[in-house]
Amino acid sequence: VQLQASGGGLVQAGGSLRLSCGASGGTLSTYRMGWFRQAPGKERAFVSAISWSGGSTYYADSVKGRFTISRDNAKNMVYLQMNSLKPEDTAVYYCAADRFGRPGYSSIASAYDNWGQGTLVTVSS
């Protein structure tokens, strides 16, 4: 499965963006999906994840209440709605797919098998 993230851009603090992650070469419907981000000079960090059914969602503390992850398995898409953006949200955002979905591993980057190329989000103050 090849993943492609899109929807990044430049936005002012307090604004919103919606990231999308699409797949080709296979279906995402059986994968746990995650979003990670990497800010300049920092390590890749967990943002959010969603179970294959969409019934369970997970968020980093830094984005709880501001970001919402969702998926549409019929369209083979995963989304990250980002509201109330802050300058510290500036990063390259990556979507990733985890075929096993082991409990307790939703925030662990090494658990994810496939990664998209990333989309840049820049939040200006």
Image (cartoon, rainbow, N blue to C red):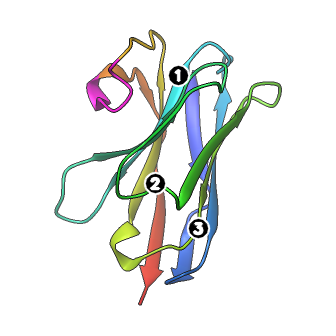
Tell me the residue at 56%/64% (across/down). Answer: 8
Q: Closer to the camera: disc 1 or disc 2?
A: 2
- Dot 3: what SS? loop
In the picture, the disc for residue 65 is none
Task: Identify the residue under disc 3.
Answer: 83
Q: Closer to the camera: disc 1 or disc 3?
A: 3
Q: Is residue 22 above or below residue 85?
A: above
Q: Residues within 10 Å of mark 3 (few under 14, many from 20)?
A: some
The amino acid on which the numbered mark 2 sits, given as a three-letter code, is Lys
Tell me the residue at 19%/50% (across/down). Answer: 43
The amino acid on which the numbered mark 1 sits, given as a three-letter code, is Arg
Q: Closer to the camera: disc 3 or disc 2?
A: 2
Q: Quadrant of residue 29?
A: top right
Task: Identify the residue under disc 2.
Answer: 64
Quadrant where the N terminus sits is top right
Asked if one can make out residue 117 in the rendered structure from this viewpoint, the answer is no
State the extent of the magenta-drawn residues as a range.
Answer: 104-110
The amino acid on which the numbered mark 3 sits, given as a three-letter code, is Asn
3 and 2 marks in contact (CB < 8 Å): no
| Badge 3 or badge 2: first in the primary sequence | 2
- Dot 1: what SS? strand
Between residue 29 and residue 55, name the one nearer to us: 55
Q: Is residue 86 above or below residue 35?
A: below
Between residue 101 and residue 118, name the one nearer to us: 101
Quadrant where the C terminus sits is bottom left
Q: Is residue 61 above or below residue 120?
A: above
Task: Identify the residue under disc 1.
Answer: 32
The CA span between labels 1 and 3 is 23 Å
Rendered location of residue 35, percent (x, y)? 46, 42
The CA span between labels 3 and 2 is 10 Å
Tell me the residue at 38%/24% (across/down). Answer: 112
